[in-house]
Amino acid sequence: MAAPSFSPAHEKMLKYFEAHPQDGIQKALWLRHNVLVLSVDAQHDAEALAKAACKRLLESGFAGMQVSVDVIEHRVLLQANRFEEAEHLDCE
């Protein structure tokens, strides 16, 4: 099954978040058109990252989409192939 495709704006946001390794982001993906998942190293502040991601999304034109950010631990994703949510934030 092919991965879902999203708009160029969605793809631009993925590239933006994955280009910032200082934030501990290993992988970014859209779970749905309005749910961004950021897979991060465990030692990073998930709450602060979710807030910063929401701010960036809202500034980039995602304000009317009821967008949210889920921050998950990359180690769990790799080892167990499942999400273990460290933080969830509805962007407002």
Image (cartoon, grey):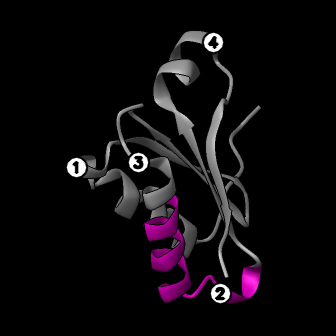
Confirm whether the magenta stretch covers residue 62: yes
Query: What's the residue type where badge 4 is placed?
Result: Ala
- What SS does tag 1 mark? helix
Q: Distance between the residues labelled 1 and 3?
A: 12 Å
Residue identifier under label 3: 45
Residue 81 or residue 11, whichever sits in front: 81
Q: Do the residues labelled 1 and 2 touch (CB within 8 Å)?
A: no
Q: Residues within 10 Å of mark 4 (few under 14, many from 20)?
A: few
Q: Where is residue 55 in the image (x, y as percent from the top left)?
A: 48, 78
Sequence-wise, the earlier of marks 4 and 1 is 1
Image: 35 above or below 24: below
Which range is magenta?
A: 50-65
Residue 34: numbered disc: none
Q: Distance between the residues labelled 4 and 1?
A: 25 Å
Residue 80: numbered disc: 4
Residue identifier under label 2: 63
Q: Which residue appears at 36% of the width and 42% of the height?
A: 44
Query: What's the residue type where badge 2 is placed?
Result: Ala
Q: Which residue appears at 66% of the width and 62% of the height?
A: 89
Q: Which residue appears at 28% of the width and 55% of the height?
A: 19
Q: Distance between the residues labelled 4 and 2?
A: 33 Å
- What SS does tag 4 mark? helix
In the drawing, does residue 15 fall left or right of residue 22?
A: right
- What SS does tag 3 mark? loop
Residue 3 or residue 54, whichever sits in front: 54
Confirm whether the magenta stretch covers residue 82: no
Sequence-wise, the earlier of marks 4 and 2 is 2
Q: Distance between the residues labelled 1 and 2?
A: 25 Å
In the drawing, does residue 15 fall left or right of residue 61?
A: left
Query: What's the residue type where badge 3 is placed?
Result: Asp
Magenta portion: prevailing SS class: helix
